[in-house]
Amino acid sequence: MKNKMKTHSGAKKRFKLTKSGKVKYSRVNRRHRLNQKDTKRKRINRNALYLEKGDANLVKSLLPNA
């Protein structure tokens, strides 16, 4: 029996693949100690980002079943 392709457990928690094939991720600094962070900084951090093409190819190799 052949070995199965395993999904990287760290990558599956941090990245999502969109229907168009882009890799979506959320920004950092949104977990704790939010009362001392600026409102503008928190507002900007709400929006998700997409990886660049080179980085996206690396992450897609870590997510074979996504």
Image (tube, helix red, strand yellow):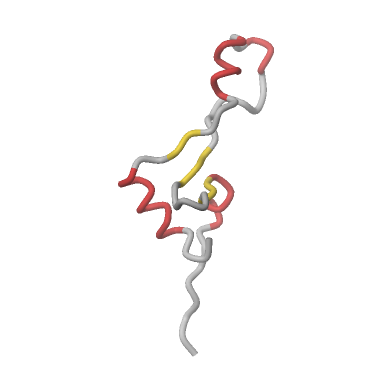
Q: Position of residue 51 (x, y in %)?
A: 41, 40
Q: Residue furthest bottom?
A: 1
Residue displayed at 47% across by 80% down: 3
Residue displayed at 60% across by 26% down: 46
- How many numbered marks have been drawn onto this rendered protein structure? 0
Residue displayed at 48% across by 34% down: 49
Q: Position of residue 20 (x, y in %)?
A: 46, 51
Asked if residue 43 lies left or right of residue 49, the reply is right
When the figure is inspected, residue 38 is found, relative to residue 29, above or below; the finding is: above
Asked if residue 24 lies left or right of residue 30, the reply is left
Residue displayed at 52% across by 63% down: 7
Q: Position of residue 38 (x, y in %)?
A: 59, 9
Using the image as rendered, state which of residue 62 and residue 16 is in the foreground.
16
When the figure is inspected, residue 18 is found, relative to residue 6, above or below; the finding is: above
Q: Residue furthest front?
A: 20
Using the image as rendered, state which of residue 22 and residue 57 is in the foreground.
22
Q: Position of residue 30 (x, y in %)?
A: 61, 26
Asked if residue 54 lies left or right of residue 59, the reply is left
